[in-house]
Amino acid sequence: MEIIPAIDLRHGACVRLFQGDYAREEVFDLDPSSVARRWRDCGARSIHVVDLDGAAEGRLVNREGILAIQAVDGVSIEVGGGIRTREDADWLLSRGVERVVLGTVAVDDPSLVVDLAEMHPSGVAVSLDARDGFVTTHGWLVGTEITVLELCRKMREAGVSRFVYTDVRRDGTMTEPNFEAFEELARSTDVPVIAAGGISTLDHLGRLKHAGAAGAILGKAIYIGSIDLHEAVQQFGG
């Protein structure tokens, strides 16, 4: 199982939010590249980067921070948050970003997802951000009546070969993942599903692996020390 540390960018800094609430922000480091080097030195081979400003505004905002992280040797990055045009996706992929993570456009402009998945078969993932089983969009600020399983099925038919699942109500809470919902999703598709949201112990990682997770994105837990990233990588894989 792939262990993927997260760096969430807001106003150029590395931050964490509680349940995606922009009013409940905690700043961890003003230099995202130093955080990337720290996670690399713990054994991580890939980093999940989220442009929080971009997610709210619908366009890439933290380009400088993304490029600073991308410049760190020995680690690849995937980027999500506000990628809603071909131009933004191409800008990232042309600069060596391994994968773009699309969310809102999977609902609002699925044809763009189809086109990008055709052009970059391994370079596109779709983020399934759930609140009570239904997909949320626009930086988790807008609810929909589309179920996670329905969007997963549609995007798989569109050619998407990787998903990231986040239970919004668990994200940043240091409680536990929504194991039941994740397992149902993982069993419903034939491609890798990455778990995120609420992961706060090594036991949680073990349960997610048992539930079929191809990977796990770690956020607040590694920033406050409830999970030692080096230990997680050693136990479960980089």
Image (tube, grey):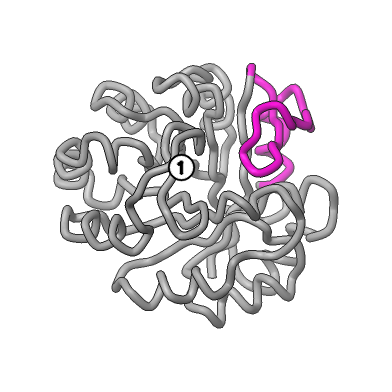
Assign the C terminus to one quadrant of the image.
Answer: bottom right
**Which of 145 and 7 lies nearest the eye of the viewer?**
145
Q: Quadrant of the N terminus?
A: bottom right
Q: Position of residue 125 (x, y in %)?
A: 35, 49
Question: Which of the pair 104/133 is nearer the observer?
Answer: 133
Residue 76, horizontal then vertical, whole percent: 49, 44
Q: Using residue 21 as the reference point, say whether residue 141 is left or right of it.
A: left
Q: Residue furthest front?
A: 145
* Residue lying farthest to the right in this orientation: 225
Residue 23 painted magenta = yes
Amino acid at dot 1: Glu
Q: Position of residue 9 (x, y in %)?
A: 61, 28
Name the residue rendered at 56%, 45% in the picture. Answer: 47
Residue 172's x, y, as percent?
Answer: 70, 47
The quadrant holding residue 94 is: top left
Q: Which residues are magenta?
A: 11-39
Residue at 38% across / 66% down in the picture? 192
Determine whether, in the image, residue 206 is placed left or right of residue 29. left
Badge 1 marks a residue whose secondary structure is strand
Pointer 1: what residue?
78
Quarter residue 53 falls in: top right
